[in-house]
Image (spheres, rainbow, N blue to C red):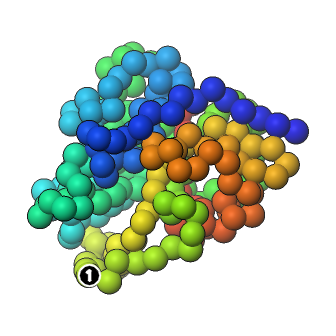
Amino acid sequence: MKILYDVPQILQNPELPNGCEITSLCELLHYYGFEIDKCDLADHYLPQSEKWYGADPNTVYLGNPRLDNNSPETGYYCFAGPLITAADKYLKEQKSTLRPVDLTGAEEPELISVLQQGYPFIFWASLHFEDIQYDGAAAWMLPDGTWHKPFHMLHCMVCKGMDEDCYYIADPLGYNTQVPREQFMKIFRQLGNRALILR
């Protein structure tokens, strides 16, 4: 069994050095026929915090995805919530019936099922699918009272298909094209089983 969808690769660089999440959303939107620019999505649809630390990555992008790691106020990352906000706003403006659906918590059978139903998905992993590391420089309390210890080398991509051995990837940095299923799921779980689709 092989499933492979024609999700375009859109590179985040040079404009969005820390914009893998919004670029992944742009890849998915282009797959569905929308011609939105990644920078337009980042600048006008993605909720962002003023600083890269202290905010909740479930509700805003931490910092600015246009800023690289050499900037005093860099861009960092976000999880599904801010992408859902951006996608929902854009799709409503386009009068599309597509909507973002948060799959956070999904295990492999559900990921396979959405692929079989025709839905490539955005997911969170690490830059080279290596074990997750944490940035020791900072940690902060989120509004729900939990502490957020920021991830190091976190990366967001689109899964565009699978076969018996691998998942196929549209990577905004161009590093990953296919990943063994066992390694994919190992790192996917380390990042909290975070994924979303448009349907």
> Which amino acid, mark 1?
Ala
Q: Is residue 98 visible?
A: no
Q: Looking at the picture, how far across and down is residue 38, in whole percent?
A: 33, 32
Quarter of the image containing the C terminus? top right
Q: Looking at the picture, how far across and down is residue 36, in whole percent?
A: 35, 23
Which residue is drawn at the image coordinates 20% and 51% (left, top)?
67
Is 1 located above or below residue 52 in the figure?
A: above
* Pointer 1 local density, CA inside 10 Å: few below 14, some 14–19, many at least 20: few
Which residue is drawn at the image coordinates 51% and 33% (left, top)?
9
Which residue is drawn at the image coordinates 32% and 20% (left, top)?
93
The quarter of the picture where residue 107 lies is bottom right
Q: Which residue is mark 1?
A: 137
Left or right: where 43 falls relative to 161 = left
Is 133 located above or below residue 7 in the figure?
A: below
| Total numbered circles | 1
Which residue is drawn at the image coordinates 77% and 35% (left, top)?
3
Is 117 located above or below residue 196 in the figure?
A: above
* Secondary element at tag 1: loop
Left or right: where 98 falls relative to 60 = right
Pick the front one: 63 or 111: 63
Left or right: where 192 falls relative to 37 = right
Quarter of the image containing the N terminus? top right
Q: Is residue 40 visible?
A: yes
